[in-house]
Image (spheres, rainbow, N blue to C red):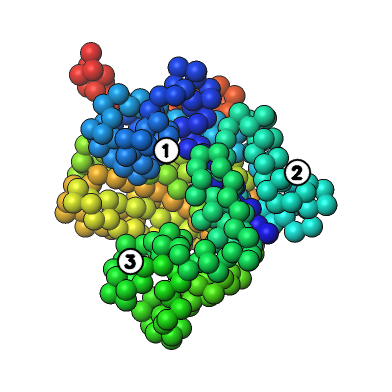
């Protein structure tokens, strides 16, 4: 059996835990701008139809009394680490798939903790006792059903799908609930008159593959209760990114450059904290009409320098023909390697390589200062307000 543990309204619950004045009130974790989107909504806010990824202005329309909390990623990471340590005490086979959810293979653990439901209850109680947060747990013979089950009795529920009831559950499971079935796939499902996962049985695997690609083959397997994916305990983070929805649409190059610099600083800091080097750098641009593009590039050598990330991100941006105003910018890195892994260096060490190493040393020093005194202690000169801007604010 496999458990899927999903924290309940994680970011919002952490904020309510740490601030008694927010308890039992509708809150959202989001930027304070009307252009921002909801990261997490408390269950009190969800009663008004507010959900993740909803624009903040819509959340305010649905619930005028909603409280907006900026949030703190460092606080959420600290809570997540404690939770994952607790879960690891019940089974060595834990796959953390995001900051607030994980799969657990409990094969052989029954001798220590009893049947799956008893074990799930003990995990829930331990997390609440030590971290003061609730979670919902799904239990099933396969991963995809465990994930679906964890969402069936939220918040703070436990749902068990036994092997002997699995086929009946699949027959009646709405196809829209299956992970990976999005809006485009649903249009085809309507044409094929597929309403439940069980309806997939009537179609040949070849036809499904033609209509849906690889997902068609997977849907056929899932409809027969087969899921070959295992709990991967060596989860590897594949990318690090940061993006911001702007308070006003922009078209000015200097403003875009400043935003890309701030994002690159943030991504670089997270990259160094993970003790990783990257090889790929990307940018994301969403325009005022909500169309979006991404651009990426493989850099010459491994790096964790914020300056290198910014220079490459800016270079990618300058190659985009920006004809519409921009509402969102993002910077990301991928293609990781551990910082301690030996890298073949150029014996002649070109000047550009020396400069990169110098900037990495500067970044390391700045990271140490921020870690000790706070993230606002050191700011790039180009990111500080100009004299004219300060006068306007006065």
Estimate the x, y position of residue 283 in percent, counting from the top left. 37, 53
What residue is shown with label 1? 40
Vertical placement of 16 versus 213: above or below?
A: above
Identify the residue at horizontal 30%, vertical 58% (top origin).
Answer: 293
Distance Cα–Cα, label 1 vs label 3? 25 Å
Estimate the x, y position of residue 56 in percent, counting from the top left. 29, 35
Distance Cα–Cα, label 2 vs label 3? 40 Å
Instruction: Please tell me whether mark 3 sits on a helix, a strand or a loop.
Output: helix
Identify the residue at horizontal 18%, vertical 51% (top origin).
Answer: 289
Residue 387 falls in image quadrant: top left
Instruction: Please tell me whether mark 2 sits on a helix, a strand or a loop.
Output: loop
Instruction: Please tell me whether mark 1 sits on a helix, a strand or a loop.
Output: strand
Estimate the x, y position of residue 362 in percent, counting from the top left. 54, 36
Horizontal relation, residue 393 to residue 347: left or right: left
Q: Nearer the viewer, residue 51 or 92?
A: 51
User: Taking the image as drawn, is residue 95 in sight?
Assistant: no
What residue is shown with label 3? 186
Q: Nearer the viewer, mark 2 or mark 3?
A: 3
Q: Nearer the viewer, mark 1 or mark 3?
A: 3
Q: Classify mark 2: residues with Cα within 10 Å, few (<14), some (14-19) or many (20+).
A: few
Looking at this rendering, what residue extends furthest in the right direction? 111
What residue is shown with label 2? 89
- Which quadrant: the C terminus? top left
Identify the residue at horizontal 23%, vertical 46% (top origin).
Answer: 326
Vertical placement of 304 versus 190: above or below?
A: above
First-in-chain label (1 vs 3): 1
């Amino acid at each position: 059996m496999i458990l899927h543990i999903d924290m309940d309204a994680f970011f919002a619950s952490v904020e309510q835990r740490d601030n008694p004045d927010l308890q039992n009130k509708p809150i959202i974790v989001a930027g304070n701008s009307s252009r921002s989107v909801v990261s997490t909504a408390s269950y009190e806010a969800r009663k008004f139809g507010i959900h993740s990824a909803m624009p903040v202005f819509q959340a305010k329309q649905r619930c005028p009394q909603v409280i907006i909390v900026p949030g703190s990623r460092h606080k959420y990471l600290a809570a997540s680490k404690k939770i994952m340590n607790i879960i690891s005490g019940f089974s060595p086979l834990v796959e953390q798939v995001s900051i607030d959810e994980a799969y657990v293979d409990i094969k052989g653990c029954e001798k220590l903790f009893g049947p799956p439901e008893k074990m799930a209850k003990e995990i829930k109680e331990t997390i609440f006792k030590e971290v003061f947060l609730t979670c919902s747990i799904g239990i099933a013979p396969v991963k995809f059903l465990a994930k679906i089950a964890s969402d069936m009795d939220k918040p703070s529920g436990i749902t068990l799908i036994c092997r002997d009831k699995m086929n009946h559950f699949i027959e009646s499971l709405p196809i829209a609930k299956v992970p990976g079935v999005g809006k485009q796939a649903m249009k085809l499902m309507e044409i094929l008159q597929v309403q439940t996962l069980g309806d997939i049985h009537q179609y040949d695997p070849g036809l499904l593959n033609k209509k849906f690609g690889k997902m068609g083959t997977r849907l056929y397997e899932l409809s027969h209760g087969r899921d070959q994916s295992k709990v991967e305990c060596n989860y590897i983070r594949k990318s690090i990114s940061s993006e911001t929805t702007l308070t006003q649409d922009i078209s000015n190059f200097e403003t875009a450059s400043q935003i890309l610099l701030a994002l690159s600083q943030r991504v670089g800091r997270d990259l160094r904290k993970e003790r990783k080097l990257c090889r790929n750098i990307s940018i994301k641009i969403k325009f005022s009409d909500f169309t979006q593009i991404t651009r990426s590039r493989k850099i010459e050598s491994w790096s964790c320098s914020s300056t290198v990330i910014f220079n490459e991100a800016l270079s990618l941006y300058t190659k985009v023909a920006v004809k519409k105003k921009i509402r969102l910018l993002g910077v990301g890195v991928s293609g990781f390697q551990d910082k301690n892994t030996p890298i073949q260096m150029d014996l002649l060490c070109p000047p550009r390589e020396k400069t990169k190493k110098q900037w990495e040393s500067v970044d390391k020093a700045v990271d140490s200062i921020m870690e000790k005194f706070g993230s606002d202690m050191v700011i790039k000169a180009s990111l500080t307000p100009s004299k004219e801007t300060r006068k306007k604010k006065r």
